[in-house]
Structures are given as structure tokens and as C-alpha cells.
Image (cartoon, rainbow, N blue to C red):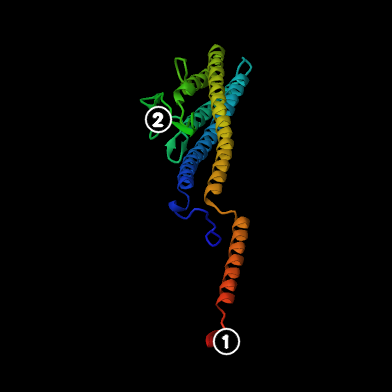
């Protein structure tokens, strides 16, 4: 035990302890699997959170740009510049929802090999699905690690935010204040959808963080139980070794004294 550091080197050393140690090792393996899934989920969620933050910022910029283009006092050059800004922001929003993580599209639902949005025959088309990929981050808790981009870009509206931005840009160019107001309402709804999606994502991020703390505590407790079963209390083992060595030497001394014979013993 002193040389190996192990109390159990084979099942025969402690059959029941061996069984319990195997169970603890199985528990540790399960916790480690959850921990790996947890770490991967945390990274994906952080990436999606970052994207949605930028997405909301771009919508805010679009709203500000459209508001500045309202009114009869805006000249044609200013309206053209604002319209160009809106179209640039629209393209940036498309890029956001087409973000990939390790080669998989985050906002295409479970259809992660296809970009969420593409322009097909002049129409912005969602190419993903409404399903979401989920990961077990601990026993009894799952989080979504892919997202329905259509729910963010369109929701219950009749058109998606990209089409709304294109329409809004045209209204700005033409000085159509009624059209600008309609477009602003659509952008506000798009902003609200993005905020709701980010709030749900934030809840999952909090769940992942809490699971990480629990998994760490569970692993420490399980490893302590395994160590008590398998590992040697070195101070105790060394003490017992010294006691055994002392007894052994005393026994050798007693035998040596008992067997010592003199010449007179032989002459008898």
C-alpha cells in the first residue's frame, strides 16, 4: 500500500469496496460527459448571444436612420444616403442570422448545414426549420444550441425584417412619410422579437452556469468518495508499516536468541 499509494490493488483486497469504487468511477465518467456537453453549449450560447446583441444594435441604427429621414425638410441627397444606410444594415442583419459556429449555422434550426436566409428569385427566403437542437447539460436539464431564425426575423408578421427594410429604404428615397412610419413599426416589432429571443437565450446561459457549479461540486464529492475507497491514508499506512517492521525485527531477535548455542551445549 505504501509503495503503490492504493488501498485496493485488486478485487480481493476489498470486494465490497471495489464494487463501490467502480460505481463512483461510473458516476465520475457521467459527470465528465455532462461537463463536456456543458462547456460546448456555453460556447455556442455565448456566440449566439453576441450575434443577437449586434443584431439588436443594427435594428436600433436602422430605426434611428429612418426617423432622421422623416419630414418634408429632408432633401433628396439625404434621403438617398439614408436609404443606402438602411440597405447596408439589412445586409448586415442577413449576415448575422447566417452566422456559423464550427461550420454549423446557428439560426437555421436543426437544418444546420444550410444558411438561414438567402434571396431566392428576388425574395428573402428562410431555408432552415422551426426545430431546435438541444443538449443535456446535466441530468434533467436541456438547453437549445440552435435557433429558429424565422421566429426572430419574421415572427407573426406577414413579411420578414429584410423585406421590411427594403420597403422602408424605398419609402425613404421617395419621401413617403406614411411608408416610413409603417416601416418603423415593423422594425420595432423586429427589435422586440430579437429582445425576446435574447432573453430566452440568457435564461439558458444562466442554467448552464448553474449546472457547471453543480457538476463541479458533484465531481468533487464523488472523487472524494472514490479516493476514500481506493487510496491509502499514507500516514496511517506508514505507521502500520513501521509497527510491522518493529514486530518483525523483535521476532527475529527472539528467534536468534533462542537458537544461539555455545560449545558447552554441543559437549553435553
Residue at the front extreme, as displayed: 268
Please tell me how many numbered marks the rendered image carries.
2
Give the left or right position of residue 157, taking residue 79 as reference: left
Q: Residue at x 59, y 28 (%)?
A: 57
What is the number of the mark on residue 264?
A: 1
Q: Are marks 2 and 1 in contact (CB under 8 Å)?
A: no
Q: Position of residue 162 (x, y in %)?
A: 47, 24
**Nearer-the-camera pick, 259 or 134:** 259
Q: Earlier in the sequence, mark 2 or mark 1?
A: 2
Question: Callout 2: 10 Å neighbours few (<14), some, many (20+)?
Answer: many
**Label 2 – label 1 distance at C-alpha:** 100 Å
Residue at the left extreme, as displayed: 121
Give the left or right position of residue 204, taking residue 119 as reference: right
Q: Quadrant of residue 253?
A: bottom right
Residue at the top extreme, as displayed: 178
Q: Position of residue 233 (x, y in %)?
A: 59, 53
Secondary structure of the residue carrying numbered label 2: loop
**Nearer-the-camera pick, 251 or 58:** 251
Looking at the image, residue 219 lies above or below residue 198: below
Q: Quadrant of residue 184?
A: top right
Q: Residue at x 47, y 35 (%)?
A: 99
**Nearer-the-camera pick, 250 or 216:** 250
Looking at the image, residue 83 lies above or below residue 135: above
What is the number of the mark on residue 110?
A: 2
Q: Position of residue 106 (x, y in %)?
A: 46, 33
Question: Callout 1: 10 Å neighbours few (<14), some, many (20+)?
Answer: few
Amino acid at each position: 500500500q505504501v509503495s503503490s499509494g492504493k488501498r485496493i490493488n485488486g478485487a480481493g483486497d476489498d470486494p465490497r469496496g471495489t464494487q463501490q469504487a467502480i460505481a463512483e468511477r461510473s458516476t465520475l465518467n457521467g459527470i465528465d460527459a455532462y461537463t463536456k456537453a456543458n462547456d460546448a453549449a456555453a460556447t455556442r450560447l455565448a456566440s449566439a448571444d453576441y450575434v443577437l446583441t449586434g443584431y439588436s444594435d443594427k435594428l436600433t441604427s436602422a430605426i434611428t436612420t429612418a426617423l432622421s429621414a422623416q419630414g418634408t425638410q429632408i432633401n433628396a441627397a439625404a434621403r438617398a444616403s439614408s436609404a443606402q444606410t438602411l440597405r447596408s444594415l439589412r445586409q448586415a442583419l442577413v449576415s448575422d442570422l447566417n452566422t456559423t459556429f464550427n461550420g454549423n449555422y446557428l439560426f437555421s434550426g436543426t437544418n444546420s448545414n444550410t444558411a438561414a436566409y438567402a434571396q431566392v428569385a428576388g425574395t428573402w427566403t428562410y431555408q432552415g426549420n422551426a426545430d431546435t437542437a438541444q443538449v443535456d447539460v446535466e441530468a434533467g436539464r436541456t438547453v437549445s444550441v440552435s435557433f429558429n431564425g424565422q421566429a426572430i426575423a419574421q415572427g407573426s408578421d406577414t413579411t420578414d425584417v429584410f423585406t421590411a427594410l427594403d420597403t422602408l429604404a424605398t419609402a425613404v428615397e421617395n419621401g413617403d412619410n406614411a411608408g416610413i412610419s409603417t416601416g418603423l413599426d415593423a422594425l420595432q416589432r423586429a427589435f422586440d422579437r430579437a429582445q425576446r429571443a435574447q432573453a430566452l437565450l440568457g435564461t439558458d446561459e444562466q442554467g448552464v452556469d448553474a449546472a457547471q457549479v453543480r457538476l463541479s461540486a458533484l465531481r468533487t464529492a464523488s472523487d472524494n468518495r472514490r479516493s476514500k475507497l481506493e487510496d491509502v491514508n499514507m500516514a496511517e499506512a506508514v505507521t502500520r508499516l513501521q509497527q510491522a517492521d518493529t514486530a518483525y525485527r523483535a521476532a527475529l531477535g527472539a528467534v536468534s536468541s533462542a537458537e544461539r548455542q555455545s560449545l558447552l551445549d554441543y559437549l553435553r
